Amino acid sequence: MRTIDVDPTPLAALAGALDEVSARRLESGAHRALRVLGERTVWNVSATDTGGVGVLLHGLLPYAAGAGVRVGWFTLDGGTEFFSLSTRLNHALHGRSDGGEGIGPDQRTAYERCLASNLAEVAEQIRPDDVVVLHDPATAGLAPELRRHGVYVVWRCHVGTDVPDEVSERAWAFVEPYLDAVDRVVLTRAVYRPGFLEPGGVRVITPSIDPLSPKNRLLEPQEVEDLLRAGGVEANGAPGPGGPAGASGTPRMVGAPHQTGDAPPADRGVPGPGDAPPSSALRPAVPYVDRRPPVHVRGGAGRSVVVLSQPRRARPVPAASATAAAYSASASR
């Protein structure tokens, strides 16, 4: 396994983005979690530190650490075979037909062997009575051995389907034997619960967002204009210094279909010549400040703090999932 560093972010920063009642509830919940957890560490284990779960944990674990909770984060080591199986399981739990093949006894043997090797690398760091939050099917197979270590185990599944089918049932059958060893299962929606899980052992944490993440931060109109201009694009669509233009030299609005014959920008997701633009391409691009080191530019010259991306729906981020799940497991056992 690999260890991902978690730098604390003061909980007061998040409280400052909330109304007074919500801020008091957040502070009260943090104090309650500290009383329940005591000296325990809440470990999170995910397949990687990228993708949806990676975004969630990068955003929320620093708040838990800032509140005084001992937190740790591991990601899995594995080969192509393991991560291919993990992807198929995720797809199958969504009910996608392309995920149902190649999920069987042969894959289970390789899956368990990979997870056993991962756990052996960190077993000494995890103490009895600690809490381990496992994320998604890739990590579910760790639960039995962790339970034998005397820790509280929470399995957090971020995927599911409203209407189960043969494909999703095949994936649930794969993970079912491991879930006998968990103290709690946390789902995104109640309808995702499979029939073999008792309702009393399941908690639902509905999606939410981190209001302080760059892509969710509210921007004043002048700030939007400054960011666009820094990225080489005027807010009214005219190019700024070094701004994007087609091969013919014709100025092009970011987010609008580009001119026929122009090469599409390398990483902006703009359609190629002759392609029908997605509906999002008819709206302005969304600027945001990229705070990740190293800071870099995509989409134009200017100060190296601006990233221009096509508009997309904000990814749901369950609020305080690690702390809430840890509290639920510890308080009831």
Image (tube, rainbow, N blue to C red):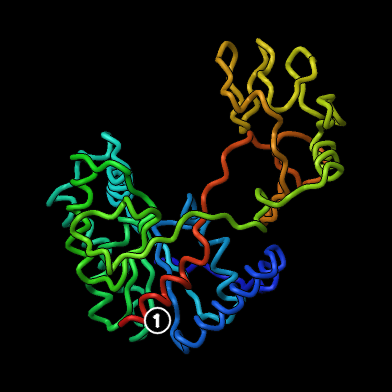
**Circle 1: is it few (<14), some (14-19), or many (20+) Cα within 10 Å?**
few
Q: Using the image, determine if residue 201 lies above or below residue 191.
A: below
Q: In terms of depth relative to the viewer, which is nearer, 41 or 231?
A: 41
Q: In terms of depth relative to the viewer, which is nearer, 154 or 73?
A: 154
- List the single residue furthest toward the front: 21
Q: What residue is shown at x 30% (from left), y 37% (from top)?
A: 96
In screen coordinates, is 267 left or right of 149? right
Residue 315 in the image: state x and y as whole percent. Answer: 53, 47
Give the secondary structure at mark 1. helix
Q: Is residue 304 visible?
A: yes
Residue 89 in the image: state x and y as whole percent. Answer: 28, 47
In screen coordinates, is 102 left or right of 37? left
Q: Is residue 76 visible?
A: no
Quadrant of the rendering where the N terminus is positioned? bottom left
Q: What residue is shown at x 79% (from left), y 15% (from top)?
A: 250
Residue 179 in the image: state x and y as whole percent. Answer: 23, 65
- List the single residue furthest toward the left: 105
Quadrant of the rendering where the C terminus is positioned? bottom left
Q: What residue is shown at x 22% (from left), y 64% (from top)?
A: 198
**Residue under pointer 1:** 125
Q: In terms of depth relative to the viewer, which is nearer, 289 or 265?
A: 289
The image quadrant of residue 42 is bottom left
Q: What residue is shown at x 55% (from left), y 15% (from top)?
A: 275
Q: In terms of depth relative to the viewer, which is nearer, 178 or 25?
A: 25
Residue 265 in the image: state x and y as whole percent. Answer: 65, 27
Give the residue type that dot 1 points to.
Gln
In screen coordinates, is 176 left or right of 256? left
Q: Using the image, determine if residue 278 lies above or below residue 188.
A: above
The image quadrant of residue 293 is bottom right
